[in-house]
Image (tube, rainbow, N blue to C red):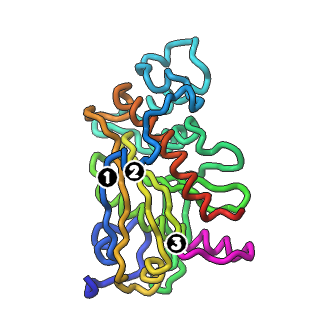
Amino acid sequence: MANIIRSAKSSNDWDDNELIAYNIAITTIPSQQFFPEGTVVPLAAAGLDPAVATADSDLLSDTDVSNSTYGFFRYLYLATTPTTPDKPIRVPMIDAFAHRILNTVAFDKGRRCVSQAHSIPLLMSDDNRQVAQMSLCLIDGESDMLLLLQMNKTETSGSNVEARMVIGAIATYQFNNSKRREMGLHPLDAMTMPCITMIGTRPTFYLVPVTKMLSDAVISCQYPSDRTEVLKCEVASDYDGGMEAPEYRSVALQYYVAFKSLAKSHWEKFLPC
């Protein structure tokens, strides 16, 4: 694939052709391989109200629920209730709901915060004017390094969303190493970026390994000799819908809790001590 034409592009223009052009493959693996510690986690033990996982949408009329649980279902309602028949999903509210999930599962606990519509500088083809636009980024408050990326898509097809997530991870590798240099630390040869995509209200989880070789290949528009394998894990459920159904939501939230621990194990490797 060395003869494929490569050029500077923003993340919005990345698609499967760019993954081929830079020798990147996405491999789906079962949850027991993706999550070494498993996904069967009691949600109450993780600090979640069990009603968040099991309640029906009519919980909005229940005056006995906590404010945080009510807020979760309110955002879910806004994300999944159509405004017009031709728009089954409310586009602006998907990002807000995705943000609410990260908050509910305490990804932003301590000195971490979630940024929506976040632009990451991207050096590509020796052009530093490009950016990778992410739906959400989890940011470390002390170092300003990016810890987790999320790319959402509101249509039912996942076309391009994974490619845009991957270039976001490459931009994050460049950005985090720049932050390390500013702090007088050596840049790292590799970082594994935890990532999430969301199609409608169905999340999928990823580990994206980014190496200096891959980043340099993107900067110089060259084909890297080593293949990059992105690991992907989909929520195992027989239900066709999304988080509006308790049958799906209860499983998906366990994946989120497990992914928080897995993601932390990776970002701790590139954060300053």
- Residue positioned 41% across, 36% down in the render: 252
Residue 148: image quadrant is bottom right
Secondary element at image label 2: helix
> On the picture, is 96 further left or further right than 239?
right
- Does residue 241 appear left or right of residue 116 in this picture? left
Mark 1 or 3, nearer chain start: 1
Whether residue 154 is visible, yes or no, is: no
Label 3: state its secondary structure: strand
Vertical comparison of 23 with 115: above or below: below
**What distance separates the C-alpha of mark 2 from that of mark 3?**
19 Å
The CA distance from mark 1 to mark 3 is 22 Å
x then y, percent, for residue 143 = 70, 62
Q: Secondary structure at mark 1?
A: loop
Q: Is residue 57 visible?
A: yes
Q: Give residue 65's quadrant in the image.
A: top right
Q: Which mark is residue 29?
A: 1
Residue under label 2: 34
3D distance between C-alphas at marks 1 and 2: 6 Å
- Which stretch did the figure color magenta? 174-190
